[in-house]
Image (spheres, grey):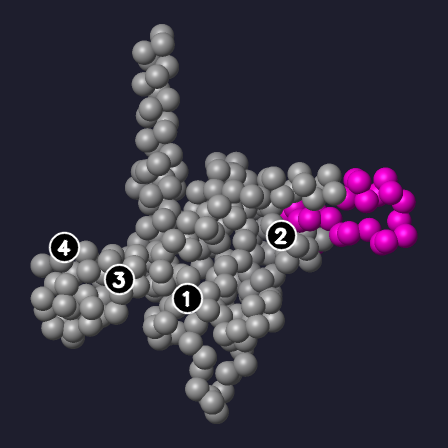
Amino acid sequence: MFIDRLLVTLVHLRLGLPHAALAELYRVDRSTVSGAIREVRPVLAAHGFAVPDRPGLRVRTLEGLFAYAHAEGVDLRINGIEVQVRRPRAGRPGRKAFVSGKKSRNTIKTTMFSDAQGRTLFSGVIRPGRMHDQTAVRTEGIAEQFRWHPKVRAEADEGYRGLAKEFPAQVGSPPKKPKDDAPLGEHHAWREQRRRQSSARICVEHTNAEYKQWRPLQRFTGRRETYADTHLAIAGLVSDRSARRATHRKTSTELVLVRQG
């Protein structure tokens, strides 16, 4: 039944158990588990991302994200995620493209967008780990989205400083550190500006930590060709959970206010 195939896929995504181990748990053949995961994982990946307080509305593209943020006045938080993957075989073209300069290992990089409360609104822009964070989102057309939606603002880390220079009224990033011989007041001002900017975007780091609770996003041991579907499926499930938590908190607050009234 579909519910059984869905459950085995969710267990695989959450715990990263091998197909053979899942086959033993569910008392079926390994090929049955593999077939179920191949069938259900793309369905979850294509489901999109939940929008808080808007049941039934799903974000599936970067264009849709910016249209939603523009219409609702949502400030975005941007952050890159790198997950270690298998090293391509020797002699294969593009082998060095996965070597991350920051991690010094083979990775795949994705970009995550959340709101000011850390709720996932979109995750994608999947590129090899060697590509810079800012280059990855530019190849996806993020600069054009900022031009088309001038009211949308975002906070990002120093990896997106070039984007902040191009759109200073829309994108915020940590200020550059002053030179060592600069006046002491400039160093104090720099620390204060950096602290405020970090406080504004710390929520997206908390969301990243929630992604890392899923075993495949700690270190991906499957085929690199299936990483995109795996990441999108997990990100969609995380967005559903964060949206439900937001709805539950809102309902609880309304009940408390009614009782107090």
In terms of depth relative to the viewer, which is nearer, 103 or 141?
103
Image depth: mark 1 or mark 2 in front:
1
Q: Earlier in the sequence, mark 2 or mark 4?
A: 4
Q: Earlier in the sequence, mark 1 or mark 3?
A: 3
Q: Residue 31, percent across and down?
A: 16, 75
Q: Which mark is residue 3?
A: 4
Magenta highlight on residue 192: no
What residue did someone put label 2 on? 157
Using the rendered image of the protein, determine whether residue 70 is visible from the camera's viewpoint. Answer: no
> Which type of secondary structure does the marked residue at label 3 adopt?
helix
Q: Earlier in the sequence, mark 3 or mark 2?
A: 3
Q: Residue 208, percent across and down?
A: 47, 51
Look at 42% across and 49% down and name the residue there. 210
Q: Disc 4 marks which amino acid?
A: Ile
- Distance of label 2 from label 4 (alpha carbons): 41 Å
Label 3–label 2 contact, CB within 8 A? no
Q: Is residue 196 left or right of residue 22?
A: right
In the image, is residue 187 above or below residue 224? above
Quarter holding the C terminus is top left
- Distance of label 1 from label 2 (alpha carbons): 23 Å
| Magenta part of the chain | 166-190
Using the rendered image of the protein, determine whether residue 24 is visible from the camera's viewpoint. Answer: yes
Q: Which mark is residue 12?
A: 3
Q: Earlier in the sequence, mark 1 or mark 4?
A: 4
Residue positioned most to the bottom = 91
Look at 39% across and 74% down and name the residue there. 224
